[in-house]
């Protein structure tokens, strides 16, 4: 259609799954939603809304990089994760998604590309495309537990690659970046001029402690321009408050130039509201209680899932170390979509692996967020359908 940019020509056709779900809902049939990713809808500890009624809530004091008090609160939050950072190297945005858009503007000319992990959360392709930027996927090998293979990053790179994006831990694959992987990636970035975008939104959600994991790249003396992204959406389970942060690191000259340019970009939008910035220290104080409850929830649901798998079943729970999801490897036949449709018929909604660009097998993605009794109610139908599908 003429008159519109190609960048906004996204497909709006319904897939078979969304059609089947709409049909089920139209008939008033119940279902257990194992695609639920909204942390405010699953009965986790809630906050007093009065926290947002800060004395200066209606005072307008625009500061493009964010209020100093809020940036210091982010610095203190990162310090608890072992990173010594300068609050002046932190900038606020309305979300991590917005920070990506700003970073793509900062680093890429239209037609340049960024290297993104696959499988992974599908947002990056959309965000890049809206900035006129392309994505080049690098595969996370299943044989390596969906961990980073720097050889795959190098192979995906071309002359127009400007940055490599790492999701730590992967969503939905739940693999943490390890020290050895970061070191190899740093060498590649230093040799090729790639910047590193490290998405750390799930970093606090490790299920068990483990050696050599990188909780954040903030505060590390790395040879390349480095951006560590996170925000209230996942850290505090408050996506509706619209506050994300980015720590900028790397060689001093490049870092300062990046911050000066980002200040200009942020000044064009001034998108973060005042009340949430003023309330940030109090909101972050709630984080340990919320995260503890969420981790217990996710671990309990995963334990139930693993326990429900009959011995010798033709499907597996893919090993992972953290995050909010579980990945199941299922038989290639009848495959992802047919299995999702059969599960929906049995009243259980899950996502097919292709939503996340899984290849080399058939996969399902389940949210581990629902209350345990809700999650447990889905396990009987799940096990029966998977058994019937492969019979
Ligand atoms: C890996 C990852 N990064 C970023 C985001 C976006 O977070 P925000 O709400 O801060 O834009 C998500 C949301 O699910 C995500 O899974």
Image (tube, rainbow, N blue to C red):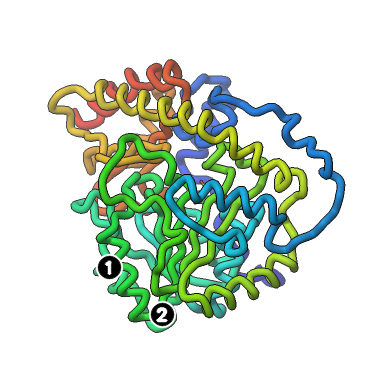
- What residue is pinned by disc 1? 184
Q: CA distance from mark 2 to mark 1?
A: 14 Å
In depth, the one of 176 and 138 nearer the eye is: 176
Tell me where residue 282 sits by quadrant.
Answer: top right
In this rendering, position of residue 141 left or right of residue 79: left
Instruction: Tell me which residue sits at (18%, 33%) in the image.
Output: 314
Question: Which one is in front, 72 or 181?
Answer: 72
Q: Is residue 376 above or below residue 26?
A: above
> Is 202 placed above or below 370 here?
below
Pointer 2 with pointer 1, Cβ within 8 A: no
Q: Where in the figure is residue 82, as x and y percent of width and height? A: 43, 50
* Label 1 secondary element: helix
Taking the image as shown, residue 87 lies to the left or right of residue 346, namely right
Q: Quadrant of the N terminus?
A: bottom right
| Other-residue count near label 1 (Cα within 10 Å), few / some / many at <14 / 14–19 / ≥20 | some
Q: Earlier in the sequence, mark 2 or mark 1?
A: 1
Q: Quadrant of residue 91?
A: bottom right
Q: Nearer the viewer, residue 48 or 37?
A: 48
* Within-10-Å neighbours for mark 2: few <14, some 14–19, many 20+: some
Q: Residue at x 42, y 77 (%)?
A: 161
Left or right: where 142 falls relative to 124: left
Is residue 142 depicted above or below 371 in this figure? below
Where does the C terminus fall, quadrant-wise?
A: top left
- The residue furthest left is 312
Residue name at image x 46 percent, y 41 percent: 16
Residue at figure coordinates x 43%, y 67% from the top left: 196
Q: Is residue 344 among what the camera can see?
A: no
Question: Residue 275: where, in percent of width, then height?
Answer: 76, 44
Under tag 2, what secondary structure? Answer: loop
* Residue underneath mark 2: 193
């Amino acid at each position: 259609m003429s008159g519109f940019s190609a960048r906004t020509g996204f497909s709006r056709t319904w897939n078979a799954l969304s059609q089947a779900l709409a049909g089920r809902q139209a008939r008033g049939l119940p279902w257990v939603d194992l695609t639920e990713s909204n942390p405010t809808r699953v009965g986790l500890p809630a906050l007093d809304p009065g926290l947002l009624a800060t004395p200066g809530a209606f005072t307008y004091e625009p500061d493009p990089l964010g209020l100093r008090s809020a940036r210091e609160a982010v610095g203190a939050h990162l310090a608890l994760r072992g990173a010594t950072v300068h609050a002046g190297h932190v900038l606020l945005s309305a979300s991590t998604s917005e920070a990506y858009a700003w970073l793509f503007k900062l680093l890429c000319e239209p037609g340049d590309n960024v290297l993104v992990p696959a499988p992974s959360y599908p947002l990056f392709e959309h965000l890049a495309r809206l900035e006129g930027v392309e994505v080049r996927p690098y595969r996370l090998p299943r044989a390596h537990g969906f961990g980073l293979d720097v050889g795959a990053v190098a192979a995906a790179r071309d002359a127009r690659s400007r940055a490599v994006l790492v999701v730590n831990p992967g969503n939905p694959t739940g693999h943490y970046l390890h020290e050895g992987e970061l070191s190899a990636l740093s060498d590649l970035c230093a040799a090729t001029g790639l910047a590193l975008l490290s998405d750390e939104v799930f970093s606090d959600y490790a299920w068990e402690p483990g050696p050599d994991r990188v909780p954040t790249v903030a505060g590390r003396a790395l040879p390349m321009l480095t951006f560590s992204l996170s925000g209230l959406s996942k850290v505090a389970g408050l996506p509706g408050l619209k506050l994300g942060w980015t720590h900028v690191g790397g060689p001093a000259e490049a870092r300062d130039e990046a911050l000066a340019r980002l200040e200009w970009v942020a000044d064009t939008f001034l998108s973060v509201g005042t009340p949430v910035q003023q309330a940030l220290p109090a909101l972050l104080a709630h984080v340990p209680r919320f995260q503890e409850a969420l981790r217990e929830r996710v671990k309990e649901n995963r334990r139930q899932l693993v326990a429900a798998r009959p011995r010798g079943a033709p499907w597996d729970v893919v090993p992972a170390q953290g995050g909010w999801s579980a990945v199941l490897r299922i038989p290639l036949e009848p495959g992802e979509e047919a299995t999702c449709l059969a599960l929906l018929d049995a009243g259980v909604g899950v996502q097919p692996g292709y939503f996340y660009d899984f290849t080399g097998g058939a996969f399902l993605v389940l949210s581990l967020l629902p209350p345990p009794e809700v999650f447990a109610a889905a396990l009987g139908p799940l096990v029966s359908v998977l058994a019937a599908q492969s019979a």
